Image: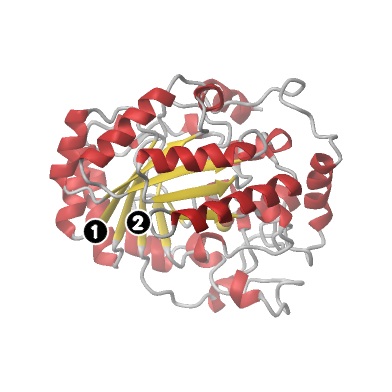
Amino acid sequence: MNAPTSIAAAVAPRPGPPLWLLAEVTYRCPLHCVFCYNPVDFARHEQELSTADWLRVLREGRELGAVQCGFSGGEPLLRDDLEELVAEAHRLGYYTNLLTSGVGLTPQRARALKEAGLDHVQLSFQDSTKEVNDFLSHTKTFELKRRVAALIKEQGWPMVMNVVLHRLNIDHIDPIIALADELGAEYVELANTQYYSWAFLNREQLLPTREQLQRAEAVTDAWRAKLGERMKLFFVAPDYHEGRAKKCVNGWGNMFITVTPDGDVLPCHTAKMLPGLSFPNVRESSLRAAWYDSKGFNRYRGTGWMKEPCASCEHKEQDLGGCRCQAYLIARDAEAADPVCAKSPHHHLVQEAVQRVESGAAAPVREQPLVFRDPGNSRRLSEA
Ligand code: FES
């Protein structure tokens, strides 16, 4: 990738405030999901921010204008101070979300979080069956998740059930939606895997076929017609099969401000891997300075940084060139057009990956084992 240029920085538009503060309070996690979006080298980032640091981050985020605060991880419930952080976020006036695997949400903690003012819970499932759920997370958590769903309902929280879809579970979409209905979810996010981080390592085994996707969308539509207003289903299509890039994170440095467990301030979960970019850390910088003045945040704002084919593309304002992390992962150039776009000179690399799956050449799990997200693999892969 080319080094950031002062020209690009000069034409970066002055942004409005962020709307979302994503507080990734820990990378520790009892699950080992094969599609986890945490950075592959997460085990190198063990110096978590203190409670006092997070309280300051929450205050600064609110002063900056953020109105929604998501507590995520890793598993945020592994932080003993989560209730204190939620209470402060609530007091500051944020709408608060907890993004959780459910592990650690005991009845006592659920009550304490309710009292602290938590507004909303997103509970992840890996599948509708115990076997696949437990295999994909490398834990025995399916029954626990069912109990946690009941706890969430008991506390009167709106519940989003989140299921990451891929080749190994997408054919179960009908029982997955039935499970969500049985558990009383108000919203179901059927999110096709985005191939970054651990999912990128396992792409060969996870990428679904076009036929699988079409069937899954048809099943989702049939459920939508049946459910009416009772439950909202969001089917997040995978960009590999689309030929068009998505406006990733709703635009770089445009809506989201993410703070990692060790305090880096990022425009997206994985931006840290992009070479030639540096991002501030809350131990040395305010969120305001990170958002408005840092080189990292300004680097890919707007359209001034683009080269061809993005620079003259009629869709550039809509997709803002797609995802910078995906451009780097596939094209090894973070300034390139997102290779999922049919106009990208690297689009053939995406097509080849899809073609391997369509033709049956992609290695099945029994031949090429999945790489599970765990600290040992993280250290091994970071060293490699
Ligand atoms: Fe980083 Fe898309 S995930 S820009």
Q: Residue furthest front?
A: 226
Q: Which mark is residue 21?
A: 2
Q: Residues within 10 Å of mark 1 (few under 14, many from 20)?
A: many
Q: Quadrant of residue 78?
A: top left
* Residue 55, horizontal then vertical, whole percent: 21, 48
Instruction: Name the image quarter holding the N terminus.
Output: bottom right
Disc 1 secondary structure class:
loop
First reached walking from the N terminus: tag 1 or tag 2:
2
* Residue 208, horizontal then vertical, whole percent: 70, 42
| Model colouring | secondary structure
Residue under the image location 68 percent in, 48 percent down: 215
| Circles 1 and 2: CB atoms closer than 8 Å | yes
168 in relation to 346, above or below: above
Which residue is identified by label 1?
94
Kind of residue sitting beneath label 1:
Tyr
Q: Quadrant of ligand 1?
A: bottom right
Q: Residues within 10 Å of mark 2 (few under 14, many from 20)?
A: many
Kind of residue sitting beneath label 2:
Leu
Mark 1 to mark 2: distance in Å?
9 Å
* Disc 1 residue: CB within 8 Å of ligand 1: no
* Residue 233, horizontal then vertical, whole percent: 48, 54
Q: Nearer the viewer, residue 313 or 183?
A: 183
* Residue 341, horizontal then vertical, whole percent: 73, 63
Residue under the image location 80 percent in, 34 percent down: 362
Q: Nearer the viewer, mark 1 or mark 2?
A: 1
Q: Quadrant of residue 377?
A: top right
Disc 2 secondary structure class:
strand
Residue under the image location 73 percent in, 20 percent down: 366
Q: Nearer the viewer, residue 184 or 30?
A: 184
Q: Which mark is residue 229?
A: none
With 381 as the anchor, is 84 left or right in this view? left
